[in-house]
Amino acid sequence: MYWGGNPAECHPRHFTKYTIMQKSKFLPRGRKDRTMVLVDIRETKSVKAADIFLQVKPGKDFELITILRALIKDQEVRDDHIAETGLTRATLEDLVKRMKAARFGCIFFGMGLSMTRGKHMNSAALLTLAAEMNAFTKFVAMPMRGHGNVTGADVIMRWQTGYPFGITFNRGYPRYNPGEFSTVDVLVRGDCDAAFIIGADPGGTMPQPAIDHLRRIPTIVLDPHITHTSKLARVHITTAPQGIAAPGTAYRMDEIPLPLKPPLKSPYPTDEEVVRRINEAIARKPFWLPDGNQPHMLTSQV
Amino acid sequence: MTRETSADSRVILRLKRSPTVPLEAEVITPDVLGSLSNSEIRSLTVYHGKRRLPLGDFFDVEGEHSCDLELHGNMEKVRWVGRAMSQGSVTVHGSIGMHLGAYMSGGRIEVHGNASDWVGAEMKNGFIHIRGDAGGQVGAAYRGSLAGMRNGIIIIDGSAGLEVGMRMRRGTIILGGPARDFAGLQMKGGTIVLLAGAEIRTGAWMNRGTIISLKPLTLMPTFAFAAEFTPAVIPLIARHVAKFGVQLPSAASEGHYRMFSGDLAVPGKGEIFVWQPVA
Amino acid sequence: MLRIINGKVYDPANGVDGEVKDVCIDDHGRIVESIEGGRTIDAGGMIVFPGGVDVHTHVAGGAINFARAMTPEDHRRTQAFIRTKTRRSGLGGMAPTTFATGYLYAGMGWTTVNEAAVPVLSARHTHEELSDIPIVDKSTLTLIANNEILLDQLEAGAFERAKDVLAWYIWAAKSYGVKAVNPGGVAAWKWGSDAKQLTSPIEGYARLTPGVIITQLARICEQLGLPHPLHLHCNNLGAPGNISTTLDTLKHLEGSRAHIAHSQYHAYGGSGWDSIRSETTQLADYFNTHANITTDAGAVLFGDTVTITADGPWQHLLYKLTGRKWGNLDVENETGCGIVPYTYRPSNLVNAVQWASGLELLLLIRSPWQVFLSTDHPNGGCFWRYPEIIKLLMRADFRQECLKRLPDKIKKHITLPEIDREYSLYEIATAMSAGPARALGLTQKGSLGIGCDADIVIYEEDDDVQRMFGHPRYVIKQGEIVIEDGDIRETPEGREFLFKPSYSPDTEEFIRPLFEDCYTMSFENYPVELSRIERADVIEGVTP
């Protein structure tokens, strides 16, 4: 099941390499041995690949998932509640039957779910649906991430700080609070007085107040290309493109690390080299906290 | 700890320099300031971004040795005021930033202005009154925590944002204005009174606890309509909130409450009462 | 160069039991007979141990990293390491961050850790994390007992081929040894089921049973000459009455060397959660008569933790029992993993039995060369709580005191109250260092013999042994003082031990089509490049 994503256009290798096309020991006929369900608010190019398409009314994902969770447990659901999601009881009962009959169900959810009204609670609801399905058969769920290697950033932040994103280091140790420290919120509120941007183009994707703030403060961009952000930045350092002219590791959406083997050489430095040199330059400056001014370890955090 | 305080004195902090980035000032609590002299207060450390600076750089300080604090100014970027306070009072004239009164266990906070997100988050006890609007996550649990506010009272005269009372276990939240989505999300106990209703998904995933709304609500499909009556608990709650100047109708001549139970998705035994005035 | 004088030395690997003698360290960080010049530490009134070795822990890789994401509430309340000019910031707690992991292990005198569960497919990730764990030396075990390509060989009875395939996998993962988790059970979990009977065919297979996997893997590990024998997490973990499965497993291992991981979780009698009881006496008897098998306790300490295991079906059960958060990872055709935060409570009968069983095994198995200190971090408790276990082992009266906190009905379920054995310092040094180092085949570790790595911990003698072991006076890693008086002085990078077994040269071409048939990445990207391992220390296997 794909929910709120459009892999045909956004993750073009997902069908062929990962989910529905591959032949395998237990599914020797590949696509024919699988059922694919797509849930989205509009008909996208992915519909062609689906066996079943469920068009949910915009903003009704949380309700629809809630109804599915009730139906798998044979709880009663009122007709008017089902109708509000844009779907029919027959459709949903058929879906529940198929889900329970599956030997191994996978749900992939995209930003059409996780970034629309309800946000993290939409994701939580879908993850709970998958968890509860394990009372009947094997079921898993996984997010479809947006940009290349956003998973890699997430994975490394977790092992170094304990948190995936929305982190501040201002007290000398990592603290976490999405909504308070997440990039878009920090920019919209104007909570930062400088920005260092690597591997992203917020100038093209973020709300206008965030972009305005980036324009106001010294913004430094590392990017191989000219982007919306590089155009508004005070400094743009051109770097070698990852995977094409710079080596490294990228984490797939399922957190499997892949080595990047660049086929080309670039006259530009890699992101890593630029960051390393900036770090070295900073290390030559006096440390921002006077030594001995801070305990080395806190037993009670703020 | 011996404390030298005099009942009629107070410590007055006036913001003299606007922070350009968030100012983390968890030291501004009666517990920390109460026993300090004026110069000791001015030399307390606050964090302006990553810089450690004396509180006196941002505030003019009047008075000393008092557990009653008064704050003046546009303090939208000043965070953590009243963190973990257990006594005394904080009165804010102006707006205040995030985490006001988070983890507090006693005392009073009053804001004549607006507050931001996480007002009274994970508070254990005490009293918070916001005369203006509040942000999201009022009285809520921080991300990942199992429980939000454990007791105490939060009154917001104006509106509030998302996830009001998320995972609260006990205590009371009263909203004069409307709440946004997910009021009472994953509630485990306590009471939320919505005098002006809420947007959608009120009470989603609630386990226990009570939500009372004087305006119609859009409820999740997993709430069951239970009864149309005014149960004995309503006059009790009405008496409780009357102490704070909030009137809950409960006379049969005025109308009745429609009671819903849920959220079956959890499954939970929470109760939502929606006021139905006599037509 | 460094000379430690006047200390009471406990060096079980060389039979030294509290003798006052000097220890000399050369410029290469090795222990030598004598040196000229250099710094001298006067360890008068102190005791000198070889640095601790953790035979079974989970500190790096996809699973623990998933656990970190799942427990922000713990990170917020735990100790925080503040960044300094020379040290990275981090957080301790149930699932510490990488830098903090190194500081915390070194901070209590442990200098070598064995990460006990690495899927080949995400081994690259594990190694990246390990290189962010400072100070300690590291080794890893590859998860193999549910790898479908290997199981297919065992199903077909192609033993020699299976041996080559396994050897290739160890080197592909740049690993040190082999870990088998719930053999067949994790593969069955892909179908939503489990493998609880050693003699029943595994779901998806016609003939292959968990018993066959266990016997064959143990043989393969021996024939490949692995420094550490098969490291086995038995089937039926955590279930009441699972002692029969465990004893049956041991029979399947008869004659081979093996290490049984966290045996506390595999030593229960009874038929349900109400009747669960400790059967450690039976299990200890087996160890006491079979010197070829080693184990680690997997002891449980009361409090909050997060459970992480490749045992997917067990974690689903635990999720249903607790109703708390649950993470599940399936690693394609190789293995899986489940994560559930958990609180062990003294008032809970099952938890109380688990707490007692871990200590019972440590006390009933006579030779500390056979049973090692572990909590299966973070499953039974966090590694930084080891000093608590040491106190429980060394002080019988403290144990009796702790027993009073348990429910009264516990008496019929455990044997701990009847045990009065107390560990000596010499036995502690064996169970925390010399023993695990020997079981891992790390000859330069866990010993203060000439030529060994100068990984040394020095404690100020103290009647409060928990305080003593929790706060070493000095910790020396490869000749360098890394901890002094509770302060982190230096944060050198540790090495990683790898084992390169020999295998038939056609193995790669044999695996390639099987891999391409079912995996989602290209074969060339699958093995971890040796150049990616920072400070690799490769031990070459000899052709059998």
Image: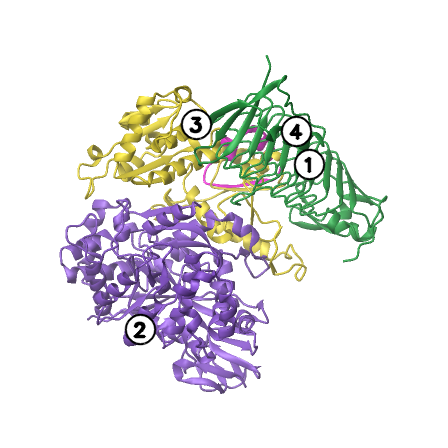
Q: Which residue is mark 2?
A: C285
Q: Whole-Å distance between the Cαs marked 2 and 4?
A: 68 Å
Q: CA separation, marks 2 and 3?
A: 58 Å
Is there a contact, CB below 8 Å, between mark 4 and mark 3?
no
Mark whose residue sits in front, 1 or 3: 3
Which amino acid type is marked by label 3? Glu
Q: Tell me the kind of residue under disc 4.
A: Ala
| Badge 2 and badge 1 both on one subunit | no
Label 1 element class? loop
Task: Look at discs 4 and 3 and give the one toward the viewer.
Answer: 4
Do the residues at pointers 2 and 3 share their chain?
no
Name which of mark 1 and mark 4 comes first in the sequence: 1
Q: Which mark is residue C5?
A: none
Residue annotated with mark 3: A63
| Bounds of the magenta segment | A202-225
Give the letter of the chain under mark 2. C
Residue C221 spot, x, y in % from top left: 24, 66
Circle 2/circle 1 CB separation < 8 Å: no
Q: Left or right: where does residue C13 sit relative to residue B236?
A: left
B249 relative position to B220: left or right: right
Please tell me the colour of chain B. green
Q: Chain of mark 1?
A: B
Q: Which chain is depicted purple? A: C
B125 lies above or below A88? below
Image depth: mark 2 or mark 1 in front: 2
Residue for badge 4: B238
Q: Nearer the viewer, mark 2 or mark 4?
A: 4
Specify whether residue A222 is painted magenta.
yes
